[in-house]
Each structure stands twice: as C-alpha cells, then as structure tokens.
Amino acid sequence: MKKTAALLLCLVVTFAAGFLYAVDTSFRCGNDLISIGYSMYQIRNSCGAPDSEQVVGQKEVKEQRGQNKTDTTVYITEWTYNRDSGIYILTFEGSKLIKKEYKRLN
C-alpha cells in the first residue's frame, strides 16, 4: 500500500511539474498559441517581427530526394520577443520551431 501511495504521489508531482513547465513556455500572439513545428512564416504572420533575430549555429542534415541523398546545411536561429515581464526565446532549425523558452525579468 505504501509503495502504491508513493508511486501515485511521484506521478502527480511529475505531472504537475510538466504542466507548470508547459504553462511557463506557452507563447500566444493574438488568438494563436505558438506550437513546436510552426514555421518562421507562421510565427512572423501571427506575432510580427521579433525584437531580435540571431543565427546561433548550423547543422548538417541528410535529405532524401527521390533516389538521391543530399547533405544540406540548416541554420539554427533564435528569435526573441519581449512580452509582459519576460522574454520568449524561440529556436528554429531551418525554418521550423524546435524549442520555446521563457525567461522572467526581475
């Protein structure tokens, strides 16, 4: 019985932590909730131009095009938006959003 209660408590704490993380990194522009996988075009269309935009790296990826495999370089780009009491940092690989972060300003 004690193991079941401990396991249940662990699951509840893990779920709550994940939920709070999701709330902290939710980024809304108008009626649109920006999600992982959105394109730069979709975000710029919904949110406008970022407050800053910076290429922070690059990555080599292999692409299959028909019978041929090609190596392509994609850029890792960070966009920042100053909102409310913090800064949202959106990280893109190529033109797709792969990560959202929120940093509270003190």
Image (cartoon, rainbow, N blue to C red):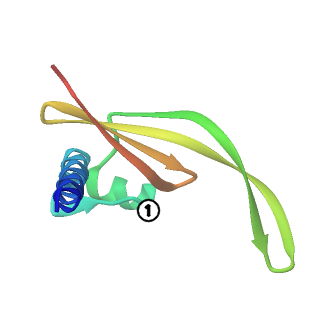
Crowding near pointer 1: few (<14 within 10 Å), some, many (20+)?
few
Q: Position of residue 98 (x, y in %)?
A: 46, 52
Q: Amino acid at mark 1?
A: Gly
Q: Residue furthest top?
A: 106
Q: Secondary structure at mark 1?
A: loop
Displayed quadrant of residue 61: bottom right
**Image side of residue 3 versus residue 68, left or right:** left
As displayed, is residue 86 above or below residue 93?
above
Residue toward you, 53 or 4? 4
Q: Position of residue 76 (x, y in %)?
A: 57, 42
Instruction: Pick the residue in front: 26 or 66.
Output: 26
What is the quadrant of the N terminus in the image? bottom left
Q: Residue furthest right?
A: 68
Q: Quadrant of the C terminus?
A: top left
In the image, residue 69 above or below residue 52:
below
Q: In the displayed image of the protein, which residue is found farthest to the front?
A: 1
Q: Residue at x 61, y 35 (%)?
A: 57
For the point 18% across and 48% down, the residue is 20
Question: How many numbered discs sit on the rendered protein?
Answer: 1
In the picture as drawn, the residue positioned furthest to the left comes out as 84
Q: Going by the image, does 77 lie left or right of 102?
A: right
Q: Which residue is mark 1?
A: 37
**Location of residue 83 (image quadrant):** top left
The residue positioned 39% from the left and 59% from the top of the image is 36
* 57 relative to 78 in the view: left or right: right
When the figure is inspected, residue 90 is found, relative to residue 15, above or below; the finding is: above
Position in image of residue 93 (x %, y %): 55, 50
Horizontal and vertical percent for residue 86? 20, 31
